[in-house]
Amino acid sequence: MTFRFQSEYKYKAQVKFFSQDRKGYEWPGGGKAYNLDDSDVHAIKLRCLGGEKICYGGWVTGNAKLYWGVGADGQQRCSSCCYTCNGGQTPVIHLK
């Protein structure tokens, strides 16, 4: 599954992904995150299980209080930040 992001925020951003079906499973894991350091569209490919529900969490680099989706810890609520792993790709997700 490929998630596509474009940061339109004025500062650098980071994203992580959280499985809603496998407790504690996240990408990239190990306390790391994917960096969005420019306004280009970034394609992030995840190896996930077919049918698995994956939610993204994004935040401003250095300030996790400013977040998108489920946030840096995966604990926030969101209305449209989760996708089902189906081998395809998401539309471009714009972080503003």
Image: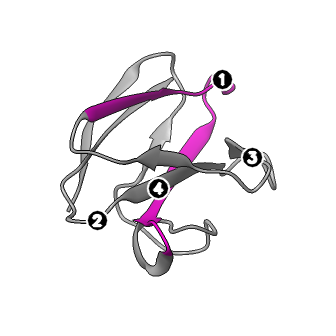
Whole-number angstrom distance, CA of label 4 to CA of label 3: 13 Å
Which of discs 4 and 2 lies nearer the camera? The answer is 2
Whole-number angstrom distance, CA of label 1 to CA of label 2: 28 Å
Tell me the kind of residue under disc 1. Arg
Q: Position of residue 36 (x, y in %)?
A: 38, 47
The residue tagged 3 is: 29
Badge 3: how crowded within 10 Å, few (<14), some, or many (20+)?
A: few
Q: Quadrant of residue 93?
A: top left
Q: Is residue 3 above or below residue 14?
A: above
Badge 4: how crowded within 10 Å, few (<14), some, or many (20+)?
A: many
* Residue drawn at point x = 67 percent, y = 41 percent: 28
The residue tagged 1 is: 47
22 vs 92, nearest the viewer: 92
The residue tagged 4 is: 14
Which badge, 1 or 4, comes first in the chain's sequence? 4
What secondary structure is marked by label 1? Answer: loop
Q: Does residue 30 show up magenta in the picture?
A: no
Q: Is residue 95 left or right of residue 2?
A: left
Q: Is residue 34 above or below residue 47?
A: below
Span highlighted in magenta in the image: 41-62
Which badge, 1 or 3, comes first in the chain's sequence? 3
Which badge, 4 or 3, comes first in the chain's sequence? 4
Tell me the kind of residue under disc 4. Gln
Whole-number angstrom distance, CA of label 3 to CA of label 2: 23 Å
Tell me the kind of residue under disc 2. Tyr
